[in-house]
Structures are given as structure tokens and as C-alpha cells.
Amino acid sequence: MRAKRSKKYRKLMHQYELTFGFREPYQVLVDSNFLQQVHNFKMDLMPALERTVQGQIKPLLTKCSLAAITAAQPINPKTGKHFRPIHLPPPTVLPLRHCSHNPESEPIDEIDCLLSLLSPNAEAKKNKEHYILATADPAVKKSDNNNDNQQRKRKRDEERQEEQALRRARNLRIRARSIPGVPIIYVKRSVMVLEPMSTPSENVREGVERDKFRVGLPQPETKPEEGQEGAPKKKIPGLKKAKGPNPLSVKKPKKRTAEPTGSKQANKRPASEAPRDNKPAEQAGGEEGDAPKTKRRRRHHKSGPREGDEADPAPVEADQAMDVEA
């Protein structure tokens, strides 16, 4: 595919995405004539469709289209069923789209089936499922030049059927154009072509663009000015706040064990400051008399008595008596 054509198709699919909400993978409804032409021109179905729509695709084949394809094939005498056509891809490549148009789920005309899927409601034409229609003109058999004079005199039944099939294929394309938002792909001389937007689709796109101008572009939110409530404070350039110390370099505080209140007061007073005069507690009532006496601490001093301490008089009198006797 040429670069100019691929760029054109990319823009066209982008318009379908903005206006009608198309998303990848695109769902493509394939009819019997399209498969026949793809096989005749030896084209790969998936790569050719992906190049045309410039994106990922999901091809679908309806039950009614499958019935139309198998009905045109001869019957196998052994099984009594129609032969599988060569141009029909396997279900792994082309999955089946189940459509039930009647309670018996019997297949109907292929054109009516495709149009009912493109627009379920005939009055309100709208492509809700975002389908892409892939169709083509039926293949025309080549006639021999020697029999040109005979063909001018009479038309055979096959030619009449071909003309009728060609009209029906063109009628399908015309009716699909009347539904807004339906991209149409068709094969023409071994080339897949994506049709430009139809007139109903263009009208819808223009209406969407007008609505955008009426509403206007979204305005940015205005920030409150200084002095108003909720206005952010203006930062002074060059002003730096004092930061705290690095938490990794700070020494962790020691954990203190919980102690009872009574033991704290007792531990505060050292043993050296114990009371010297251990007098028995006054027995006042029964509770104070039962309290045990504090044990008297005995001291041994090598040097003389400390300041403030009164010397015992007994040793002084004993020394005086020894001097008199001498």
C-alpha cells in the first residue's frame, strides 16, 4: 500500500474513533462475495484488512453468510452434504457470528442479515456495535470470444443470475451508506479500498464539531489571589528554615524501667546519711508499737573525733586518775 493512501485511511479511521467511538480491535463483518474475491486475487485476509484500517481487526462471518456460501457448492454424494468451499477460511481465522432472526434460528437472506446487524432498529439508524462492512462485487465469469454472436442473441440463465447478484451487492452498499457511522471496505481489481465517509456520517461529524464550539474550550481553574481565603502564601526567595538534626546521628534515649513510688524515695537517701539516733518509735496505739526498731550502726574511727561530735567524758576521767596514782 502506498504511503499516501495509508495516511489517508489512518486519518479516516481516526475520525470514526472521535465521532462514533470505534476502538481496536475493529469488528469486520465479511460477506460471501468478499471472501470469493480475496481468494481469486490470492490475498491474505488478515494482513490485507489490517493494512486497510491501519489497526488490529476481528473478522466475523454470520450464520446467514455461511449458509449462502455452502448453498452455492455441490453436494457430496457420500455424505449428502455440501462440499466445503476452498475460499472459506477455517473457524480459527474467521470465527462465526451467531445471529438469530427468528425463533427457529433459520438463516435468512444474507443482505437482510448484514443490515440488521449494522442497524438493529430500522427507524433509528445507528451502528451500536461499531461494525465495519467488508463486501465486494460478485465474480463474473469470462466468456469465449468465439461465442460472442450467440451471446448477443440470447442470455443464459447464468448471466441473468450474475446480473442479479451484482445489483444486490450494489444495493447492499447503498443501503449501508445510509446508516451513519458504517465504514465500508470493498475489493476492486486486487486492491482493498476504504470508502470515504458517507453523507449521513459527515452530517453527524459536523454536528459533533458544532457542539464543541457551542460549549467552548475548557477554561483553566483560576487560583485565588493574595489576601483571599485559601490563597497560598507567597514564598520569599532565599529564605531557608532551620532544619532539625539528622535522625541517624542523634543518640537514642535510654529506656527507664518503671519503679514503685515507695522504693524511689527510699533509694534517694544514701546509707551514709542514716539517722544516728535510733530511738525506739513512740508507741502510739497498737500499730506504731509493733513497728521494728532500726538497727544501730557501729563506727570505728582511727583518727580523732570529727567536728561537731561530742567527746565521751569517761575516757578523760580515766586518764586523770592514772596520773594521780603515778
Image: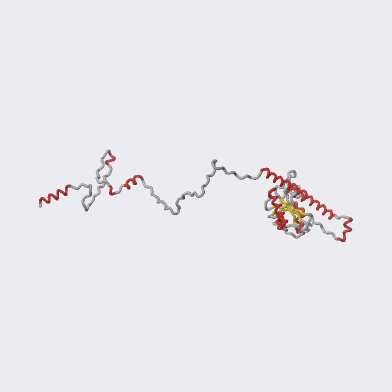
**Residue at 32% over, 47% down:** 268
> Considering only vertical position in the picture, is 35 above or below 262?
below
**In the displayed structure, would residue 221 be above or below residue 156?**
above
Where residue 29 appears, as percent x and y from the top left, is 73, 52
Q: Position of residue 115 (x, y in %)?
A: 75, 48
Residue drawn at x 84%, y 55% as measured from the top left: 159
Residue farthest toward the top in the current orientation of the protein: 285
Q: Where's the N terminus, which quadrant?
A: bottom right
Q: Residue at x 75, y 43 (%)?
A: 123
In the image, residue 25 lies at what x, y percent?
68, 53
| Left or right: 185 in relation to 235 | right
User: Measured from the top left, where is residue 48 in percent x and y?
Assistant: 72, 57
Identity of the residue drawn at 34% across and 46% down: 264
The number of numbered discs placed on residues in the rendered structure image is: 0
Residue that protrudes farthest toward the left in the picture: 325
Nearer to us in this view, 23 or 286: 23
Residue nearest the observer in this picture, 324 or 108: 324
Residue 112 in view: no
Give left or right: position of 168 versus 266: right
- Left or right position of 11 against 139: left
Q: Quick check: can you spot residue 253?
A: yes
Front-lying residue, 296 or 179: 179
